[in-house]
Image (tube, rainbow, N blue to C red):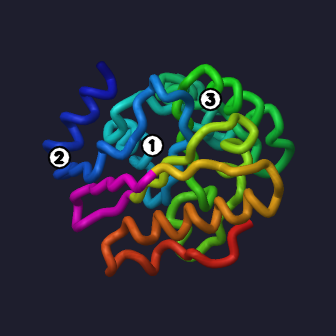
Amino acid sequence: LVRNGFFLYAKLFHGFKIIDRWRVPPKERGGLVVVSNHISTLDPPMMGAAMPREVHYMAKKELFENRYFRALVLGLRSFPVDREGNASSAIKEAVRRLQRGFAIGIFIQGTRNAGDAEAQGGAAFIAQRAGVALQPAAIWLEGRRYRVRFGEPIFPQGKSREEAARLTADLMRSIRELLPEHKRGSVSAENPH
């Protein structure tokens, strides 16, 4: 109900458009790590509205400190991650949810308005541990209109650090290519970590 309501809001007030949604594997195919760039505080609900299945998000722990905002992020199926300290509990929770068939949303550069910030390797690492596909997605604005485009899923082939680095580079390249040409400078495909 909330997702459908937000979708209607996004269509009416933000000219929301979804491109290549058919590329997203259905829930029956198992867990999925949805990986995208991050440009705005509206990205999680916009991406959630664009997805044909429910998305749970890793969110910085600070969002859970205010009781009102905590209710909102919990309602969006988010769970906390400590970006400055030990993220092992968030990683374990993500893997548990993925193994139960849920989709987990992760912003590859770790923060919004990242510009040319380097990619973080967490999405690839989590997908490797859970044995699930990675779904690249790009989100951007054309004026006030939101756009989301989905790429082809990427499947991990191993669990090594080298494989995680390769997957992260592939994801960044895919996200960059999903963006319109004039927006591609906002996502760097170089130096994934």
Q: Earlier in the sequence, mark 1 or mark 3?
A: 1
Q: Residue at x 80, y 41 (%)?
A: 87
Task: State the residue position of label 2.
Answer: 13
Query: In the rendered image, which quarter is residue 82 located in?
Result: top right
Measured as percent of width and height from the top left, residue 177 is found at 41, 71
- Quadrant containing the C terminus is bottom right
Residue 23, label in figure: none
Residues shaded magenta: 139-152
Residue lying at the far right in this picture: please name it. 86
Name which residue type carries label 3. Leu
Residue 98, label in figure: 3
Name which residue type carries label 2. Phe
Q: Is residue 116 left or right of residue 137?
A: right
User: Does 107 appear in magenta?
Assistant: no
- Which element is circle 1 on? helix
Name which residue type carries label 1. Pro
Q: Is residue 64 left or right of residue 105?
A: right
In this view, the mark in front (3 or 2): 3
User: Does 145 appear in magenta?
Assistant: yes
Q: CA distance from mark 2 to mark 1?
A: 17 Å
Q: Is residue 183 left or right of residue 55?
A: left
Q: Residue at x 68, y 37 (%)?
A: 131
Measured as percent of width and height from the top left, residue 157 is found at 69, 51
Position above or below: 115 against 151: below
Q: CA distance from mark 1 to mark 3?
A: 18 Å
Residue density around tag 2, few if under 14, some if 14–19, many if 20 or more, within 10 Å: few
Query: In the rendered image, which quarter is residue 169 located in?
Result: bottom right
Residue 44, label in figure: 1
